[in-house]
Structure formats: C-alpha cells, structure tokens
Image (cartoon, helix red, strand yellow):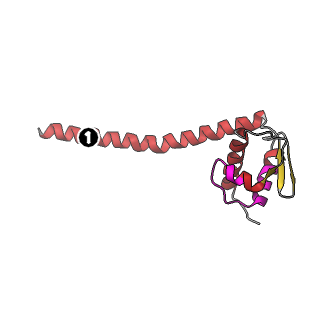
C-alpha cells in the first residue's frame, strides 16, 4: 500500500477533478481503474488503491457528488460547486507560482540586458 505525501495527494486530487470535469461519456456507466489511469490529466503511476482513497477523499470533502467502487470498477458523480472552486484555486496557485518564478527571471534578464546596453553605449 503506497503512502502519499500531502502535496502528492493534493496533486492527485487535482488531476482527478480535472479528469472528471472533462470526462465526456455517460457517468452512469461503470469505469475500470486502468481506463482512469490512462485518462488522468497528469501521468499517474499510482495504484488503484491510492486512486480509490483519493476519490473517497474527494467525495468526503464535497468535491464530487457521488462515488462508489465495486471490485475493479467504480462510478462517479459530477463535480460539485466546491470541486469546481478547488480547481479554480489550484489553477490560480499554479499560475501565481509560474509568474513568480519566470517573471523574476525575466525581470532579472531584462535588467542585465539594459545594463549591457548602457555599458555598450558608454563605450561608444
């Protein structure tokens, strides 16, 4: 039985919610675990047991309207407003981290280019 860190579990839940948000088929049909791992929005090497625990956690925290597992198949309901809000919050965090990292690198690079241009003009 694999144990996930809090960050890994959060990323797995986010990936599951993204997958179910974009799931095109009828949700009343049972889904097999291998089909879920193929469709996850982020590559997953998690066991079906870890996926099952993450889905139960999604249901328990109110992100999914329903979840039930029987053997090697499961059924899932729709995303609740709380689940959609969680997706928006995670997206905002990822976007903020992206701009914090690359924005500062870009700013530093721009400052270096301006200094190099000033030095070049001063030498002329």
Percent across and percent down for residue 25 are 76, 40
- The quarter of the rendered structure image containing the C terminus is top left
Give the quarter of the image for residue 117. top left
Residue at point 79% right, 53% down? 32
Using residue 70 as the reference point, say whether residue 55 is left or right of it. Answer: left
Residue position marked by numbered label 1 in the rendering: 115
- Nearer to me, 118 or 83: 83
- Nearer to me, 24 or 69: 24
Residue at point 66% right, 50% down? 11
The prevailing secondary structure element of the residues shown in magenta is helix
Using residue 112 as the reference point, say whether residue 2 is left or right of it. Answer: right
The vertical placement of 93 against 11, above or below, is above
Find out whether residue 20 is within the magenta segment. Answer: no
Which portion, as a residue range, is magenta?
Answer: 37-56
Percent across and percent down for residue 53 are 79, 55
- Nearer to me, 16 or 29: 29
Q: Secondary structure at mark 1?
A: helix
Q: How many marks?
A: 1
- The quarter of the rendered structure image containing the N terminus is bottom right
Q: Residue furthest left?
A: 124
Residue at point 69% right, 39% down? 22
């Amino acid at each position: 039985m694999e144990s996930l860190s809090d960050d890994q579990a959060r990323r797995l839940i986010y990936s599951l919610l993204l997958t179910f948000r974009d799931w095109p088929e009828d949700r009343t049909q049972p889904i097999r675990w291998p089909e879920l791992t193929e469709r996850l929005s982020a590559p997953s090497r998690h066991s079906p047991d870890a996926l099952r625990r993450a889905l139960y956690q999604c249901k328990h925290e109110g992100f999914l309207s329903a979840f039930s597992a029987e053997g090697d198949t499961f059924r899932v309901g729709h995303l609740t407003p709380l689940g959609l809000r969680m997706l928006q919050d995670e997206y905002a965090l990822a976007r903020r981290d992206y701009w914090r990292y690359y924005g500062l690198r870009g700013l530093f690079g721009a400052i270096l280019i301006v200094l190099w241009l000033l030095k070049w003009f001063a030498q002329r």
